[in-house]
Image: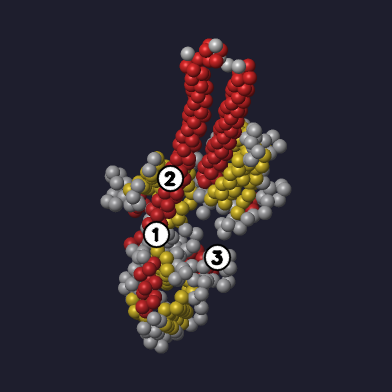
Amino acid sequence: MTRRQAGFSLVELLVALGLGLAIAIAAVSAVATALRALARLALRAEAEDVLALGLEAFTLDVRRAGFDPRATGLPALADASAARLALQADLDADGVVDATSEESTIIACDVAGGRLSRIVGSQSLPLATGVVACTLAYADATGTAIPVPSGGLDAAARARVRLATLDVALHPPGSTVAATRRATVALRSMP
Amino acid sequence: MRAGQRGGATLATALVVLLAGSLLAAALSDIARTELLVARDRRVAAVGFAAADACVARVVAALPAGWDQADALAGPDGTSGTADDGVRAAPSGCVATLLQGPLGAARPFLDVAVTVPGGGRRVRAIVGAAAAPSPAVVWAERAALGIVGGRMDVDGVDPARPDVDALPAFATADDPALTDAWIAASGGVTVAPGTVAAEIAPAPPLGAALWSRLAAAGAAPVFVSAAAPPLPMLHAIDGDVVVTAPGYGSGLLVVRDRLDIEADFAFSGVVAVSGGVHVASGATLRIAGALWLGVPALDVAGRLEVRHDRAALDAADTLFRLPRRAALAGQVDR
C-alpha cells in the first residue's frame, strides 16, 4: 500500500509527460529561434564587412586616381558612368599607365548579376555578391552633382570630377533588410 | 529513490538548456568580438587617413614659395647629401620627408608616415606649384604691415574673370588673426565685400633667388613711369624708385629698397618691394594685380588701391615666371 502511494498514477504520468514535452518543445523552439537569429546576425555582420571592404578598395582607388609624378596630364578618370568607373594612376612614376597592373582599375556595378567588382587588367575580382543596388555618382570641386548621362560622362565632364560616390546595397540570404553603405571620396590627386 | 531520479531529470534538462544558452552566448560573444575588432580597424584606418591628409596639408602649406623646392630638399642644414636631406617639420605623430621626384626639385615627392593609436598610415604626395600666380592681393612677409594714415582699399574679386576664385586681401607668414588685428587697428584699411581678409602663406621670395632669375631674364635696371599705359615690361631696380609725376607702369616691377609714390601712379601687374612702399599725402598708387612686400612694408599717407586682376597677373607671369607657393599635386596611399 505504501509502495502504491509512492508511485505515479497514469494521469500523473500523462500530465508529467505532456508538461515535459511542452517544455522540451518550447526549449527546442527557443534554441532554434535563437540559432536562426544568430545565423542571420552572422550573415548580416558578414554582409556589412564585405561592403566595408569593398568600399575601402573603392576609397583607395579613388584617392590615388590621377597620381601623375611626371606631370603628363594624366586624366584620373578614363571612364565614368553610373555603373562603371575606370581610374588610372602612374604609380611607378614612369610616365605610362600600365593597363594590366594596379595602375588601371575599374569599379563595376552589376546589379543584374548581383555583383560589385574591381577589375584589374583582365582579372575581375568580386568585391561583393548579393548586390541588389549599386550606383556611382560624381561631383565637382564645389560639391555640385554632375549629371550622368546614360552613355557616361564625356572627357570634359570627367575632368571636372573631384568627388566620387559609391552607393551599394547587399541583401544577405535570409534577411529581410538590405545592408547599405555609401562612400564619398575626394580625388586627392586632382587638385 | 524516485525523488532522486526526478531531481536528476530536472538537472539534466537544466544542464542541456544551460549548455545551449552558453553556446549561444559564446557564439554571440564571438560575433561581437569580431565586429568590435573590425570596427576598431576601420576606425584606426579612418583616423589614419585623416591624420595623414592633415599632415600632408600642413607640411605642404609650410613649404617655401618659389620656383622649386631645391632648398627644402637640402634639409635644415642647407647641404645636400647629408643625413637631414628633405627633413621637414611636421605635427606630432607625423614624420615628413621631401624626396627628389622624377622631375627633380620642381615636383618632388613628400613621404609622410603617421602614427595613430592602434596603427598608422603612410602616404606619398607630389608637391607641385599653386595655379594662382599670387596667394593674395597683398602678399607680405609679416602681419605688421606698417602705417596707413591715409586710405588703403583691397579687393580680391576680379569682376572680369568670374571663373577665377577671389584672392584673399592679405597673405602673410604670420597667424591671420594678427593680420586681422592690424587691419582693425589701422583704421584706414578697407577690404571689399566677397574678399577674405587674411590667410597664412609662406613669405614672398624677394631674396637672392629672385634677383638672380631677374638678371638672367634681362630685367631693366631703371624704371620711368609712362605717360600712357605701356606694354608689360620687366623691371628690377637695385635701389629706390621715386615716382614724382603722374604715370603708368605694367608687367613686373621689383624694387630692392623703397618705392616712393609722390604723384598718382597706376600699375598693371605685380609690384614687389623689399624696402617698403611710401605713398605721400595727396598721391595715389593703384595696382591692378598684386603687391608683394618685405619688411618694412607700408607707409601710406595718401591712397593705396590694390585689386585682383588675373589678366594682369597672367601677363606678368608670361613675362617672367612668377614664384608660387607649394601645392599638393597628387597623393597615393602606401
Q: To which residue does mark 2 refer?
A: B48
- Label 2 neighbour load within 10 Å: few <14, some 14-19, many 20+: many
Question: Could you confirm whether marks 3 and 2 are on the same chain?
Answer: yes
Question: Could you confirm whether marks 1 and 3 are on the same chain?
Answer: yes
The residue shown at (65%, 33%) is A174
What's the chain of the residue with tag 3?
Answer: B
Question: Which of the marked residues, 3 or 2, is nearer the chain's N terminus?
Answer: 2
Question: Which of the marked residues, 1 or 3, is nearer the chain's N terminus?
Answer: 1
Any part of residue A124 in sight: yes
The image shows residue B104, relative to residue A18, as above or below, that is below
- Label 1 neighbour load within 10 Å: few <14, some 14-19, many 20+: many
The residue shown at (55%, 65%) is B164
Instruction: For marks 1 and 2, give the CA distance.
Output: 28 Å
A114 and A15: which is toward the camera:
A15
Kindly identify the amino acid type of the residue bearing the numbered disc 3: Val
Q: Nearer the viewer, mark 1 or mark 2?
A: 2
**Residue B289 percent location from the top left of the image:** 48, 71
What's the chain of the residue with tag 2?
Answer: B
The residue shown at (58%, 65%) is B163
**Residue B150 percent location from the top left of the image:** 39, 84
Determine which quarter of the picture holds residue B292.
bottom left
Residue reaching furthest front? A1
The residue shown at (55%, 45%) is A62
Disc 3 secondary structure class: loop
Instruction: For marks 1 and 3, give the CA distance.
Output: 21 Å
Q: To which residue does mark 1 refer?
A: B65
- Label 3 neighbour load within 10 Å: few <14, some 14-19, many 20+: few
Q: Nearer the viewer, mark 1 or mark 3?
A: 3
Kindly identify the amino acid type of the residue bearing the numbered disc 2: Gly
Q: To which residue does mark 3 refer?
A: B164
